């Protein structure tokens, strides 16, 4: 039996279809990015939809703690054996601030700069590590943040081009 829109069942089916197709558009908006309460450990500039200091995102430990935590156990090119890193996924940070670009320019406290394809953060579980082996990273020991790739989990990540993207003493990201 074929129903028309003038029949109650047809109107109900249309309403359900419209509701289902519009629900992603009606999702709750992301709450504003709160200002940092403690020392800023990462500044994100460029193509950012949500800033908390002008159009920049300034993050402290408390703000990063609002994102889901992730642990990566992996070896590095600068340490002996596997290390345990805790932090947050870079993609979660970039999603939270509405970053939209193709490249992220990472800069360290010592002015080391490297372009990282945005696709790295979508394709791999790259984290902003704030601890290694349970110890908070300090500026004296590769902190306060270190970009860490799960190199032991993905053979491709053992290529030297990825080693250059492990930025320790991370200070800022620019989304381009």
Image (cartoon, rainbow, N blue to C red):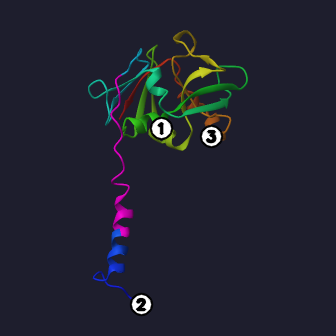
Is residue 113 in sight in this rendering? Answer: no
| Magenta residues, dominant SS class | loop
Residue 120 percent location from the top left of the image: 51, 39
x 67%, y 38%: residue: 153
Q: Secondary structure at mark 2?
A: loop
Give the residue pinned by disc 1.
91
Q: Quadrant of the C terminus?
A: top left
Label 2, on which residue?
1
Mark 3 residue element:
helix
From what the image shows, is residue 38 above or below residue 162? above
Structural distance between the alpha carbons of marks 1 and 3: 19 Å
- How far across and how far down the image is residue 119, in percent? 48, 42
Residue sitting farthest toward the bottom = 1
Relative image position of residue 6 (x, y in whole percent)? 27, 82
Q: Is residue 30 magenta?
A: yes
Which of disc 1 and disc 2 is earlier in sequence? 2
Extreme residue in the right direction: 81
Tell me: residue 121, above or below residue 10. Answer: above
Between 104 and 127, the one lying in front of the other is 127
Residue at the image position 37 percent from the left and 35 percent from the top: 97
Q: Earlier in the sequence, mark 1 or mark 3?
A: 1
The answer to which of marks 2 and 3 sits earlier in the sequence is 2
Magenta stretch contains residue 115:
no
The magenta stretch is 16-35
């Amino acid at each position: 039996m074929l129903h028309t829109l003038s029949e109650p069942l047809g109107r109900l089916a249309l309403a359900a279809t419209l509701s289902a197709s519009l629900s992603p558009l009606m999702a709750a908006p992301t709450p504003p990015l709160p200002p940092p309460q403690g020392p800023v450990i990462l500044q994100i500039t460029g193509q950012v939809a949500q800033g908390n200091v002008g159009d920049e995102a300034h993050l402290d430990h408390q703000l990063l703690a609002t994102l889901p935590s992730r642990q990566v156990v992996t070896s590095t090119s600068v340490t002996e054996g596997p290390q345990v890193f805790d932090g947050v996924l870079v993609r979660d940070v970039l999603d939270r601030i509405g970053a939209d670009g193709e490249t992220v320019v990472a800069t360290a406290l010592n002015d080391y700069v490297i372009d990282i394809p945005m696709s790295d953060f979508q394709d791999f579980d790259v984290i902003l590590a704030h601890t290694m082996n349970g110890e908070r990273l300090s500026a004296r020991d590769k902190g306060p943040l270190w970009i860490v790739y799960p190199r032991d989990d993905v053979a491709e990540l053992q290529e030297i081009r990825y080693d250059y993207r492990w930025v320790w003493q991370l200070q800022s990201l620019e989304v381009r």
